[in-house]
Image (cartoon, rainbow, N blue to C red):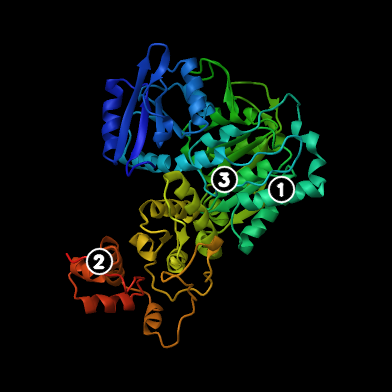
Amino acid sequence: MHSNKARVLFALFDDSSIRQIIRQFDGHGCECVVATRSNGSPFQFTEPLDRFDGIIVNLTGLSEEGEAVVANWAQKHPVAGWMATDDTNISRVVRALKMGAFDVLQGDLRPLEVKSLVDELTSRRSSAARFSSTPELPEGGAGYSAPTNGSFTGESSPILDNSSQTSMRRNGDSHPHRRHSTSCDKKGNTESLSHWLRMYLRGSSTTMESVRRQVLEVATTHATVMIWGQSGTGKEMVARAIHRCSLRKETDYIPVNMSAIPEGLAESLLFGHVKGSFTHATHTKEGLCETADNGTLFLDEISEMEVTLQPKLLRFLQEGTVRRVGDQTEKQVDVRIIAASNHDPESVIRDGKLRSDLFYRLNVVPIHLPPLSERREDIAELSELFLSRSVERHNRSVQGFTAEAMQVLYDYDWPGNIRQLENAVERIAIFAKGKLVEPLDIPAEFHSPSCTAPSPHVPSTPTNGHMASSNGGTIEHKPQENDSSVSVMRTPLSEVQRFERAAIIDALQRADGHVVDAANLVGLGQATLYRKIKRYDIPHKSHRRRKTPK
């Protein structure tokens, strides 16, 4: 983001339809800009699109020229569509999704919907920009060139991911992926793929090494893959990696979020419909299963699919045929299905979210992605990667983390996983005051509330030469036996103690680390504050004092 507020561009809205929506977005701290129709162009606005976190387009009355413009926008920017409450034209929704819109909204929005959309826009903007610089396959080969600027490890969620529009187009061969059936057997290409994958799916933990091996092994097959993991662990990144390492890499990769599809639209979206099959079906439309012919279809949050539609998906998986809504004929297609869910595998059957026969048909090759809290050894590498990107994006001069700051990140549980870590590091990069990120540069909410002894596994030497102690040396994370603060920290804190600890950290941050000023802010004596800092193992610089008296 270029400011503290999320900036949203509204396109093709008239006064009556935009007034209430803008008030809702203003209430969530957004800065709204309206682009209107103009002579000779479907849109008129004066600022570059890079200055906006997302775009919301009124789909009603959108011309073919306007659709082309929106499709171009969606290749680089998060775009959502909007329809009036009384607009029930399903074909308009399908066209919007195929243009690259990641979601289609309708009518007046509930506050929770607005908040969710704002959060999604701000988190997806950087993801779309990063994917545009992801390395592509070299011409005529099955290997990938290694990236020179890192990779991204996030995950997206709305209906049709706008970043997917970089997928390779079909070239007329009925089975283009078969043309490369032997190219991946070459040692050089395999090594190139492995290197590319190491840069694409980051992490040196044994878990991530196992995931990368599974991706390489399953990619060149046509097996159905089921990816399990919490939100933010990188499920779509794994799905995209499978496609890009596969024999179908030059064909379409189409991700669909089943939880974001409006009720009753899933069957038409996936399987298509014929003209006149239902109200507003004014044209015959192919579904995404046909669009993905010879390619890969990624069904994210598959456990949210309507139960009544699951038998049709099962038949599609078994027979490889598509029957459009209202049609009497079937069409043979060749589509690889990759599915994902953030639920526990056992619970999706027990709770009736997935039919057991569909579950077993999808779960041919299961890949499990653990939460970030279970692979903490990857936190340092990911944090350095996200910091370098944020520094470049926001024109900051931060060079890395001190070992104490990295310890804070290491100790936090990251319930939002990689996505939360990336957003946190971006905020840290924006507000950090020195060349190295120090503990007090990290917001209080990311200081672990469960006081535990510092882990000995965080590296004591700089990562890429950037992690150092606050006094210029390095930190050995070895608790001393006679350190009373360490023994106290082994005891979980109460709710009151967690609140007090967070308040002290916040005061130290507001006082730029000056303990005397922080004591005044929280209403404690200096000696009392020092005692609580030691008791709660709060990182600080004891030598930091005001340069000039107040």
Q: Residues within 10 Å of mark 1 (few under 14, many from 20)?
A: many
Q: Is residue 199 visible?
A: yes
How many discs mark residues in the rendered view?
3
Q: Secondary structure at mark 3?
A: helix
Q: Secondary structure at mark 2?
A: loop
Circle 3: residue type: Glu
Q: Quadrant of residue 502?
A: bottom left
Q: Which residue is mark 3?
A: 236
How far from the left and from the top, in percent, is residue 395? Answer: 42, 46
Task: Identify the residue at horizontal 42%, vertical 45% (top origin).
Answer: 394
In terms of sequence position, does the residue under pointer 3 or pointer 1 come before the other? 1
Q: Residue 193: which disc?
A: 1
In terms of sequence position, does the residue under pointer 3 or pointer 2 come before the other? 3
Q: Is residue 401 left or right of residue 140?
A: left
Q: Which residue is mark 2?
A: 547
Task: Identify the residue at horizontal 35%, vertical 36% (top origin).
Answer: 7
Q: Is residue 160 visible?
A: no
Circle 2: residue type: Lys
Frontmost residue, 275 versus 374 = 374
Q: CA distance from mark 3 to mark 1?
A: 18 Å
Point out the frontmost of discs 3 and 1: 1
Height in image: 194 above or below 168? below
Q: Secondary structure at mark 1?
A: helix
Q: Quadrant of residue 339?
A: top right
Q: Residue furthest front?
A: 548
Task: Identify the residue at horizontal 25%, vertical 75% (top origin).
Answer: 529
Q: Residues within 10 Å of mark 3 (few under 14, many from 20)?
A: many
